[in-house]
Image (cartoon, rainbow, N blue to C red):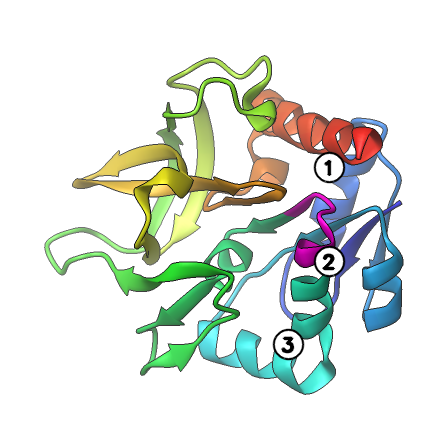
């Protein structure tokens, strides 16, 4: 079973529906022990970084996610969930993240309309990634965000997207993945990515 972390922020039901649509067994939980015992873990998120990391720290859910990553099970962060994987964010101040991926979260420059919202392309860097099985380079996916991640190590960058600049839209490090876009809102391409993640969980 795949656990979707409920820390009070995120479009949990749409993520759940997306996975169930492609035949994956998922459940929503706010219990750290259930996360640690799950076969795969999803960290969703919509909202402000500071509020999200506070809730993850207060509830122990952040620690449970980090332990799941260390256990080697497939884990994925979606949208804000991707940003929370990083060392720090400048959204609304300076906040420390989960620090699983070294790097920071910064805002798009003032000459760009924010949020970056709507359909945009992913430029795949890791074509052999299991997450991109049957996903063509240049596929369109759905974004809603004003901040983006800047990894210290470019080797974790799995795909980029251009919005005035080329920014990191997908990361991958061993068993850990993250998407800045919402796969559950990205129609057939997004569903294929969810299906691919589910296949990784079954193989692990």
Q: Which residues are magenta?
A: 68-75
Residue 137 in view here: yes
Q: Given the current orientation, which residue lies at the most extreme bottom position? A: 58
Picture residue at 22% right of the left edge, 56% below the top: 108
In three-dimensional space, the C-alpha distance between marks 3 and 2, rounded to whole angstroms, equals 14 Å
Taking 65 as reference, is 148 left or right?
left
Residue 30 sits in quarter = bottom right
Picture residue at 56% right of the left edge, 83% below the top: 54
Residue 129: x, y in percent? 53, 24
**Within 10 angstroms of label 1, few (less than 14), some, or many (20 or more) residues?**
many
The residue where tag 2 is placed is 68
- Secondary structure state at the residue bearing disc 2: helix
Q: Is residue 66 above or below residue 126?
A: below
- Figure quadrant of the C terminus: top right
**Within 10 angstroms of label 2, few (less than 14), some, or many (20 or more) residues?**
many
Taking 30 as reference, is 99 left or right?
left
Picture residue at 37% right of the left edge, 18% below the top: 138
In three-dimensional space, the C-alpha distance between marks 2 and 1, rounded to whole angstroms, equals 22 Å
Precedes in sequence: disc 2 or disc 1: 1
Precedes in sequence: disc 1 or disc 3: 1
User: Considering depth in this image, is 82 or 163 the residue closer to the camera?
Assistant: 82
The residue where tag 3 is placed is 56
Residue 29: x, y in percent? 84, 64
**Disc 3 and disc 2 in contact, CB within 8 angstroms:** no
Picture residue at 28% right of the left edge, 63% below the top: 106
Is 1 magenta? The answer is no
Residue 123: x, y in percent? 34, 25
The residue where tag 1 is placed is 18
Precedes in sequence: disc 3 or disc 2: 3
User: Considering depth in this image, is 74 or 198 the residue closer to the camera?
Assistant: 74
């Amino acid at each position: 079973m795949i656990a979707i972390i409920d820390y009070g922020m995120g479009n949990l039901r749409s993520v759940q529906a997306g996975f169930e649509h492609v035949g994956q067994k998922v459940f929503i939980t706010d219990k750290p022990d259930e996360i640690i015992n799950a076969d795969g873990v999803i960290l969703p998120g919509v909202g402000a970084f500071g509020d999200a990391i506070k809730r993850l720290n207060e509830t122990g859910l952040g620690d449970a996610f980090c332990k799941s990553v260390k256990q080697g099970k497939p884990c994925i962060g979606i949208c804000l969930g991707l940003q929370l994987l990083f060392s720090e964010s400048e959204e609304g101040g300076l906040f420390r993240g989960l620090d699983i991926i070294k790097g920071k979260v910064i805002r798009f420059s003032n000459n760009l309309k924010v949020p970056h919202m709507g359909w945009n392309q992913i430029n795949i860097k890791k074509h052999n990634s299991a997450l991109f099985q049957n996903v063509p380079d240049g596929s369109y996916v759905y974004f809603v965000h004003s901040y983006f991640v800047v990894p210290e190590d470019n080797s974790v960058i799995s795909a980029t997207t251009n919005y005035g600049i080329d920014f990191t839209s997908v990361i991958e490090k061993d068993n850990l993945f993250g998407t800045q876009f919402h796969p559950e809102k990205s129609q057939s391409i997004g569903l294929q990515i969810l299906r691919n993640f589910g296949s990784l969980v079954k193989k692990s």
